[in-house]
Amino acid sequence: MDVDYFKINEAAYDRFSGEYRKVRETNKEAVEEAILFINHIKKISHDPKILEIGPGAGVTLKEFERVGLRTYAVEISQKMIDTSREVAPSTVYTKGNFLDYNSERDFDGIFSRFVLHLFSETDAYGFVEKAYDLLRPGGIFFASTIFYYSSQEGFIEKKKEGVSALRYKKRWTIGELEALVKGGPFEDFKMSVIDKEHRKIMVQFKKVS
Ligand SMILES: C[S@@+](CC[C@H](N)C(=O)[O-])C[C@H]1O[C@@H](n2cnc3c(N)ncnc32)[C@H](O)[C@@H]1O
């Protein structure tokens, strides 16, 4: 692709940070996903070190901090990081693209809510591989996204409340997601539709060795 779509997505999410802040306190579904992850991570580590990819306004990071996880986050939008810090101040933030993220490969868990669809289909394979690399053996990776009944990828306008901006989005079908999951390095995974009406789907990966 000639255009750097990550730059365009960064600018779009800078614009949306205020809207994400507004709904942060009422986003029950996000909190439920965070609690599901917390329940799993506590079973595999006494002092979990976790990474959140694309925390946005910090709705789930806040929960991770609340229960005492050691939290790291990588986020492409500086405005989102500033907004997230208001509720998750103890997290170690890195501003940048997850595909360029460098760190020790010792995370017990990685969490990513509604970020996968902001990567092209090709880059999404790198996204899953990168998450695998950063986990310690036995670590878990939870990624949720939206599924569609027909596939599409490109610059699509996003509207949230009074703000609109163009950003790159991949509309995943369940079949494409299955191919992504099965074509990646994780041997152990479970894909489940968590909200059929709103087409929300989650993949729970485990790094076996
Ligand atoms: C749809 S929002 C979801 C925010 C939050 N996870 C939630 O559930 O409310 C996607 C977030 O991912 C961030 N993001 C997009 N592409 C990214 C990338 N390549 N690397 C890191 N963060 C990214 C955006 O800036 C935005 O904050």
Image: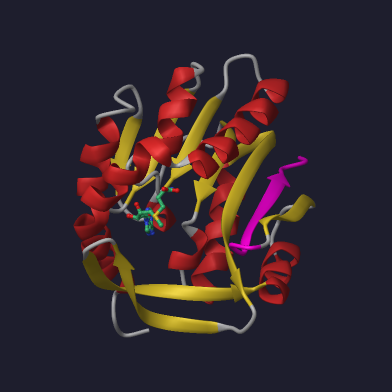
Seen in the picture, residue 3 relative to 39 is either above or below; the reply is: below
The answer to which image quadrant residue 126 occupies is: bottom right
Asked if the stretch drawn in magenta spans residue 83, the answer is: no
Q: Which residues are magenta?
A: 197-209
Q: Is 158 left, or right, of 124 in this rendering?
A: left
Seen in the picture, residue 126 relative to 50 is either above or below; the reply is: below
Seen in the picture, residue 118 relative to 47 is either above or below; the reply is: below
Residue 90 shows up from this direction: yes
Residue at 52% x, 84% y: name it: 152
Residue at 47% x, 27% y: name it: 63
Residue at 36% x, 79% y: name it: 156
Instruction: Locate residue 106, reporting x and y percent.
Output: 56, 31
Dividing the image into four quarters, tell me where ligand 1 lies. Answer: bottom left
Residue 103 shows up from this direction: no
**Viewer-side residue, 173 vs 176:** 173
Instruction: Locate residue 203, reporting x and y percent.
Output: 68, 53
